[in-house]
Amino acid sequence: MANLGTISNLATGGGTLVLAVATFASIRSANRSARVAERALMQNLKPVVVPSRRDDPEEKLMWSDRYWAKLPGGQAIARVIGDTVYLAVSLRNVGSGIAILQSYRLVAPFQMAPPVHEPVETFREQSRDLYIPAGDVSYWQAALRDKEDEYYQPVRDAIEAREPFSVQLLYCDHEGGQRTVSWLSLVPAPTTDDEDRWLGSVARHWNLDRDDPRH
């Protein structure tokens, strides 16, 4: 006859093993559900910034030196007044979360968007917070006043020659996550009736805090 103690130990061990397997499966399922819930939450917070539409409302902008300008929907400002270069792009947030514009990098002369963006450590911080509500419009703006600035002469030359140039714009959600770099271009409008008219366009977006969906 089999030893009752051995049978009891085997039964206990088998039950423990079954319980461990069930617990492991439950934990994996819970972790998977948590990841799905986290992804859904992040999706609800994610901003996606693109140039606005031509029928979007006009914005009234002021720079720190009290220079004022009107920015129609779907357009950009690339303007030299005296020794100052004024820049702005009308933007729409097509994502579901607030976009906070953090910093930028200018690229002139114009070039096609490369496969990778420049290191974000080389971007220039905005002098003030710029927010774009979800599903709404606002703008990016900057100014160049120092002739020794690395951006100053290339951007000024592009504007005066009516040649396109680009800005790499870094933004995030309102919690500082889901950082994204968007490659925007400022392009002179193909018209002769308004030599000051520029348009905004977008070529590429890079996700900094998660895998690139293109790979």
Image: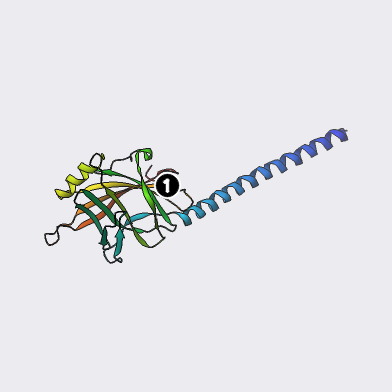
* Residue 109 or residue 39, whichever sits in front: 109
The part of the image, by quadrant, that contains residue 116 is top left
Q: Amino acid at mark 1?
A: Arg
For this view, does 184 lie left or right of residue 20?
A: left
Identify the residue at image location x=30%, y=55%: 63
Image quadrant containing the C terminus: top left
* Residue 215 or residue 176, whichever sits in front: 176
Identify the residue at image location x=30%, y=63%: 59
Residue 111 in sight: no
Residue 109: image x %, image y %?
A: 20, 42
Residue 49: image x %, image y %?
A: 36, 54
Image quadrant containing the N terminus: top right
Residue 120: image x %, image y %?
A: 37, 40
Q: Does 48 sit above or below residue 112?
A: below
Residue 73: image x %, image y %?
A: 28, 63
The part of the image, by quadrant, that contains residue 119 is top left
For this view, does 41 lie left or right of residue 205?
A: right
Q: Does 49 sit above or below residue 114?
A: below
Callout 1: 10 Å neighbours few (<14), some, many (20+)? many
**Secondary structure at numbered mark 1:** loop
For this view, does 27 lie left or right of residue 158?
A: right
Looking at the rendered structure, the number of numbered marks drawn on it comes to 1
Which residue of the protein is positioned furthest toward the front in this rendering? 65
Task: Look at mark 1 in the image and give the residue it sits on.
Answer: 179
Q: How is the image coloured?
A: rainbow
* Residue 41 or residue 143, whichever sits in front: 143
Q: Does 90 sit above or below residue 123?
A: below
Residue 32 in sight: yes
Q: Does 51 sit above or below residue 156?
A: below
